[in-house]
Image: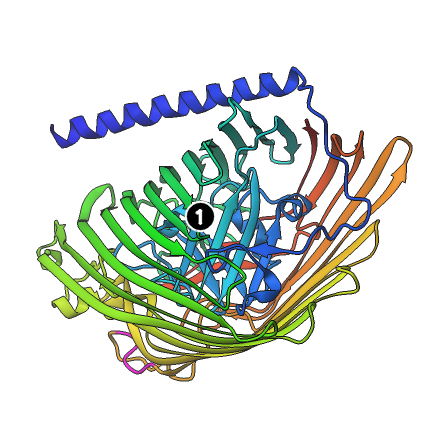
Amino acid sequence: MSLLEGNNKISRKMSAAKRVMLLAGASLSAVLTSGLASQASAQDEESLMGDRIVVTARKRAESLQEVPISISTVSAAQIERLNATSLKDLKNFIPSLHYSDRSALQTQITIRGVGGDSRNIGIESGIGLYVDGVFAGRTSGYNMDLADIEQIEVLRGPQGTLFGKNTTGGAINIVTRKPSDELHANATLGYGNYDAVRFKGSVSGPISDTVSLGVTFASWDRDGYIKNIYDKTKLQSEERRAGLVQLRFQPNDKWDILLSGDATFDDQKAILNQLGSNAAFGAGYYIPDRFYVNTDQQNSIERDMYGASLSAEYRFDSGLTFTSISAFRSVDITVHSDIDQTPVDIFRSGPFTDDADQYTQELRLTSPDGQFFEYMAGFYFYRQEAQASRRIYSAGNPLFFTDGPIDTTSYAGFANATANFTDKLSITGGVRVTYEKKEGSYEQTSTVAPFNKSFPELEISVTKPSWTASLNYLWTDDVSTYFTASNGFKSGGFNVDPLATPAPLSADDITFDPEFVTSYEVGFKSDTFDGKLRFTAAAFYATYTDRQVPQFESIGGVPTVITRNAGESEVYGGEVEFTASPSPWLLVYGGASYLHGEYTEFAGATTGGADYTGNVTENTPKWTVNLGAELRAPVGPGEVTLSPNFAYVGETFLQPDNGPFNYEDGYAVFNARAGYEFQDGRYGIYLWGKNLTDAEYKEFARQFNGSDQVLFGEPRTYGVEVSARF
């Protein structure tokens, strides 16, 4: 089969899949509007807090109180309260989490100042994201739709023992709502400014005594809010379709088998940055207002993301549980961008593409709970086949093309054990040994001879252990403290994003080394006053060796993107969170974090020999604060609900050079949601608003080849939605 035939075949498959998903959404709407005869569950009259939080941060169901890890949890109710449609909507309400979303290609998440921009397929993120136990290998697949989510767990600090490589900053564990043995359905339809239309709905129930089915569909459409002076179009528009189908088979009390398939398709007319100055490209093109650009080229982003998984659990008579999770995931990104962001055809991409397929297999054996000695042991396999292609034109003519296929193979064995010496004192230790190999090539061709580069055989491999040790003490059933020490690593990789330079390059310029971290943490957790007040606090200190730092610089007079290793760096700080429900009609919640990140040794940070030693690490807000509430009051046959919230993000450097332009001095965001619910919450109508004061803040900024480039956060948005539950 030729490459063209293969691409056409893939395109036909994607088009067919989109039609199937739209048909599924229409069918789902019909089912919901026909009215199901199931009984809606009444709202808990005792407290808005709900039951004690159960997490799976250690891959077994445990009380949050018993887990010696700094964890933030987001429930389905909180997702609704924040009117969150995707992961980026939670960014300001989880302490020490920073989220930057230039596009589906360049999602960047940091936890405690550590993460990484993995637009380059040769670099990994330092934050691992897992959905129902399945690892998402590319950050381009992170910003998914949050329809029908049961819980999100954000784990801070290295999670190398149970979650594995590439979790030097932390992990995000997303748990979807599983098919139920009773018939349930829900739907939400909303409309907002910029002609935003949101729909999500799900149906779940039995199809036999042993088999249940769940179907979820979501869509999101919004016009752009940035006006292009050049052609009078609007940019930053979004169109997303997402679906999830789950089939659960429980033939007896020993087996629990879940087959899942999901797909997401995005189409955005969006820019990656705005021109913040005109020094490089001449006068007349600087646009001072964040709601305008002046660009003459195509600016678009398309993402096709889909996957399938098979999870099987078998519980032995002894109480042991065997778990197998087999999965496949694929993410394909296509980006067209006016690189110079002017009405003159200077540089444009046409296109940038990233295609990544991954295969994973995890096997675990877990001991029963409530024993003196509790343990887990397992094996993990990961295979990723990725291809990056970059096409850059100047004045309408080809300038240079790059291609870089990268294949990654990883194996790991792990074990984790807890000794419960008393009903108060427990000590946990764990180790994981990982082998990983990356191999690929880098080819750059250009109409300008000095730019031609070829590295046909690139290969690196590493075998490294990761470990954790912790002590947890329960002072009472409601109060605990813990100490945890852990380490982890992020694998090395290749610079296969454009290295468009006439300067001589060697394999050392293409490759970079693994990143290593050691972290120490103390924490306090309480759940008091009969479950009406939860409070957690943690303080930590982490040191990093050879931290991987993606940055923009000029090599041989030509701008390029390159990842280098910073010799030593440190991050320290802490977080606090609380949730309180003093009455059945009031819930108050909040959190705060303080972070200090510094490069303690980073000489030779650029080709020109710049020294970043003493600089603040990028994307590390010094302070963050969030505060919110939910109020409910009976009015007539139903209840009025009000959910205001506030978030403050402090001063943040957005690039490691700490330049004055690449700096956000802090901002505050106010959001709110108000509604009326009746028939025990079965039906509801709501008004919502985000960034109500229309705060202006930088999501991204860089100085690149003489120009200042910036991307601002989203403006004020608002709308109305109706929902029904059966």
Say whether residue 8 is left or right of residue 726: left
Element type at marker 1? loop
Q: What are the residue bounds of the magenta stretch?
A: 602-606
Q: Residue at x 51, y 22 (%)?
A: 207
Q: Amino acid at mark 1?
A: Asp
- Identify the residue at image location x=42%, y=65%: 159
Where in the figure is residue 121, as x and y percent of width and height? 27, 53
Foreground: 542 or 225? 542
Query: Is residue 605 shown in magenta?
Result: yes
Q: Nearer the viewer, residue 10 or 49?
A: 49
State whether residue 417 appears in this view: yes
Identify the residue under disc 1: 317
Query: Where is residue 508 drawn, in percent x and y?
Result: 16, 70
Q: Is residue 255 above or below residue 437?
A: above
Residue 608: quadrant of the picture: bottom left
Task: Left or right? Give the position of 148 relative to 674.
Answer: left
* Residue 146 vs residue 707, the one in the foreground: 146
Q: Residue at x 48, y 33 (%)?
A: 239
251 lies above or below 399 = above
